[in-house]
Image: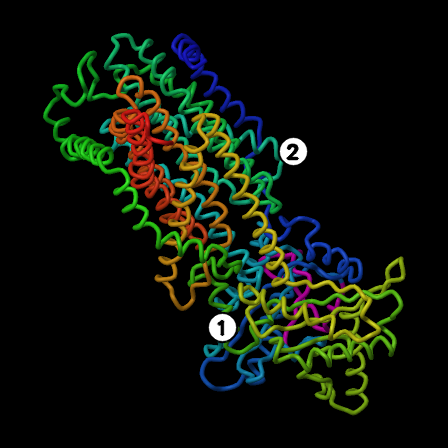
Amino acid sequence: MFEWLGQFVSRAWWAILLIWIGGLLLLRAFTPDLAEVTQGGEFNFLPRSSPTRVGEVHLKAAFPETTQGSSVVVVVTRLGDQELDDADLEFINQDLAGGIQSLMVPHTDEEPDGTPEPESAHPYGLSPEIVRVRSPQTREIGKLLLSDDRRSALIVAEISLEYMAHQIQAPVKAIESVLAHLRDEKLIPDHLQISLSGSAVAGRDVFVAQSRSAHSIERWTLILIVGLLLIVYRAPLPVLVPLATLVISLKVAMQILAWCALQGWISLFEGIEVYTVVVAYGAGVDFSMFLTSRFHEEIQRRENVSEALIETMKGVGPAVAAAAGTVIFGIGMMIFASFGKFHQAGISISFSLLVILCAALTFTPSLLRMMGRYTFWPELPQHGVEFRTQHVGPVTRLIRRLTLQEHSHRFWEWLATRLMRRPVRIWLLAILLMLPWGVVGTWFLDHVTYGIIASLKKTAPSVQGTRDMAEHFSPGITGPVTLLVEAKEIDFSLSEGTRLIQKLSDNLKEKASELQLSDIRSAAFPLGLTHDFDEAPAGNRSTLSRIVRRNAQRNSVREHFLGVKSETGVHATRLEILLNADPFARSTIAVLDRLQQALPALMPDELKSSEVFVLGPTASFRDLQQVAGVDRIRIMVLVTVAVFSVLVILIRSVPDSLYLMGTVIFSFLCTYGVAYLLFWWLDPEDFPGLDWTVPTFLFTILVAVGQDYNIFLVTRIHEERAYHGPLGSVGHAVIQTAAIITSCGLIMAGTFSAMVVGGELTRMTQLGFALAFGVLLDTMVVRPILVPTYFAWRARRASARNAAPGTPV
C-alpha cells in the first residue's frame, strides 16, 4: 500500500499540493471562524444528570426570578483603623452603587431594593446582563454587606450569565467603567480602596488570560519549532517541510471542526484551540520528520529522487501510520468522557491528528518530491556517499561542529555498545533512579485543585479583590450553599411551615461550629443568625415608620426564601448557608460533604420525607470532582486498552506490548511526581495541588504520544533483524534512530514548553511543564535505555537458550 502511495505521490505531487492549498482557501471562504461556534462556561459541561444541574432545574421552577448566574462584588475598604463614616456610606450607596445600577436596563421608576434610578443612563451605555444591584442600604440584605468592624462594605451586582461565559466580559467591563469614571472625576475619597471580586470577575480574568495565552502559545510554538528545526537540520528548507504541513493541515482541520459545530453535529469549548494546536504541532512534527529523515537516507542510496521517495514511503510509511494511529486512537478515547470538555477535546485533537497524518503521507512527500536533494541545502546529499564523510564547505563544517553532530553520533554508538553488554544492570539503575518520583506521582495522583482563583496569577483583579474581602468578611460570602427543600404537604408560607424552617435553622445553628457554618439565612432568619430587624432603616425614625418599614422589609425578604407552588402541589423553600471556608477551595468540598451527611439527622420529623437539593459553587465543584474523577479512571483504562491493542496488532507480541505499556505508564507517574514536587516547592504555603485537568490530559497525551518513539524503535529493530541478528539489530536500531527520535523529542518538548512561556493560567503552565518533562523523560530514558535493554536481554536470553538446548524454559 505505502509503496503504491509513494508511486502515486511521485507522479501527482503538483496536484496534491494544489488540492491541499485550494481546499484550505475554500474552507476559509465558506466556513465560520472557530471563535463564532465555541461555547463558554464550566459547569454547563457537566452531565445533565449531575445533582447540581438537576437541582438548578427545580430551583428555577420554584423561583422563576432567580438567576443561577454569577456576581461582581465591589469591595470598598477604608484604609487605616477607622470605620466607614456617613460620608463614606453615602458615596458607596449613592455614587458607587447608583452608578452601577444605572447600567441596568430600566423597568420601573424604582428598583425592587428601593434605590431610585438615576435621572440619566450611564455614559458608557446599558448592560442588560446585570439583573440586580445590592448595597449596604438595600432593604433585604443591606446589613450583611457591611462588615462587623464597619471598615469594609460590599456592593453585589448579580449577573445573569455563568461565570465562564465569554459574554461575561461585557458587564464586568461596564462596572469597571463606572469605577474609572469616578476616578477620573476624582469622586473617590483618598482613604477608600476599591477592588473587584466575585465569580464573574474571576471568570472574566480566566477568559482574558485564556485568550491572551492562546495567541501567545501559538506564537511561541511556531518560534520554538522553527528554532529547534534549524538546530536539528542546520538548513532552512527542511524546516519548511514540517512547518508548511502543520500550518495547512491544522487550519484545514479546525475549519472543518468549526463547520461541524455550526451544523450542530459537535460542540467545542472556548480555549480548545490551545490544547489542539500544542498537541497537534508536537505530534505532527514527528510524522513529517520521520519521513524527511528517511528520505535523507534513501536519497544517498539512489540517484533518482522518485525512487528515493518510493523507498521512503515503503520503509517508514507503516511506522508513521502506526505511530499516528496509536496517538489518534489513544487520545480518541477521551470521547467517552462524561465531562463535556474532555469529550470535545478527544474529538478535536484526534480529528486534527488524523488530518495531519493525511497531510504527512501526501503533502509532505509532495514537498520532498518537488525539492528533491535541494531539500537539505546547503548540505546536498550525494549518491553513494555516507553523509558524515561527505566533503562540505567551511561554513557547514562549523555548523556541524557547533551542533555536536559527530559527538552525538559517537555517544549513541558508545551507549548502544554498553546496553548490549550489561542490559540488566543498566535497566536496574534507571528504574532505581526513577522509582522515588513514581512513588510520589502515585501517592498524589488524586490531590488536585478545582478552584478558579488558584489558576490565576496573584496580580489578577479577582485575586486581589478576594484577598481584600477575606480580611473583613466570612470567606463563604462569595458563594453561599443553597439548600432547596421541597415538600408536598407543607406550605412554608404558613406559620407551621415557618416553624419547621426555624427548627431546621436552629438545628443547623447548634452544629455550626462542628460543620464550619458562619451564618444561616432562611425565611425564619432572613438576615441570618447575627442580624435582626430591630434597627430602623434609614429615613423617618418614628415608631409607626419603624413598624411599617420593618414589616415591609420582612415580607420582601421572605419572598426571597419562599418558592411558588408547583402544578403538582409541591411547596419549596430555600436556605442560604455561609461556610467558614473559601467556597472555591478543594478542601471546602469535604466541609460540604459533612454538612450533607448531617442533614438527614438535623431535619425536623415532618421534613424527613422532603427532597433536598444542594446548590452553589462548592456543590458544582464537587460534582465536577466526581465526574472528573470517574472520567480520569475511565479515560486511563480506555487509553491503556486502546494503545495496548494497537501495540499487539503491530508488534504481534503480548509480553513486548505489556512491557512497552508499562514503561510509558511508569514514565507518566514519574513525570507527575516531579511536576507535583516542583510546583509545591515554588509555592509551599499556597500550593493547593495540581490543576484537576492535568492528570487526565497528561496521561492521555504521554501514553499515546510516548508510544510513537517506542513503535518507531521497535519496528526498526524488526527491520534490522534480518541483517544484524537479534542482538545486533537492537544496537543498530538505537544508533540509526537515536538522532531522529531525540530531535523529535526535543522539538515536541519545546512545543509543549510554549505553554509554560506563553500561558497565563496555572493549569497551562503546569500541563506545559509536565508534558515537556514527560516527553524528555521518554526520549532520554525510556526509549534509549528501558526499551533497548529489555530487547537486548530478550536477545541474550534467546541466544543462551540456543547455545544450551537442554536448558529448561
Q: Is residue 525 left or right of residue 774?
A: right
Q: Which residue is mark 1?
A: 468
Foreground: 507 or 127? 507
Q: Name the residue furthest front.
A: 806
**Point 38% across, 50% down: residue:** 670
> Most extreme residue toward the bottom, as rendered?
543
Name the amino acid type tagged 2. Answer: Trp
Q: Which mark is residue 265?
A: 2
In the shown orientation, is residue 243 left or right of residue 477? Answer: left
* Label 1 neighbour load within 10 Å: few <14, some 14-19, many 20+: many
Could you tell me residue 582's position as x and y percent? 55, 69
Q: Residue furthest left?
A: 394
Where is residue 772? Give x, y as percent. Answer: 36, 44
Q: What amino acid type is highlighted by mark number 1? A: Asp
Q: Quadrant of the N terminus?
A: top left
Q: In what quadrant of the picture does the C terminus appear?
A: top left
Colour scheme? rainbow
Q: Which residue is located at x 73 percent, y 68 percent? A: 111
Q: The magenta stretch spans which residues?
A: 108-136
Can residue 179 be seen at all in this image of the molecule? yes
Picture quadrant where residue 803 is located: top left
Q: Is residue 129 magenta?
A: yes
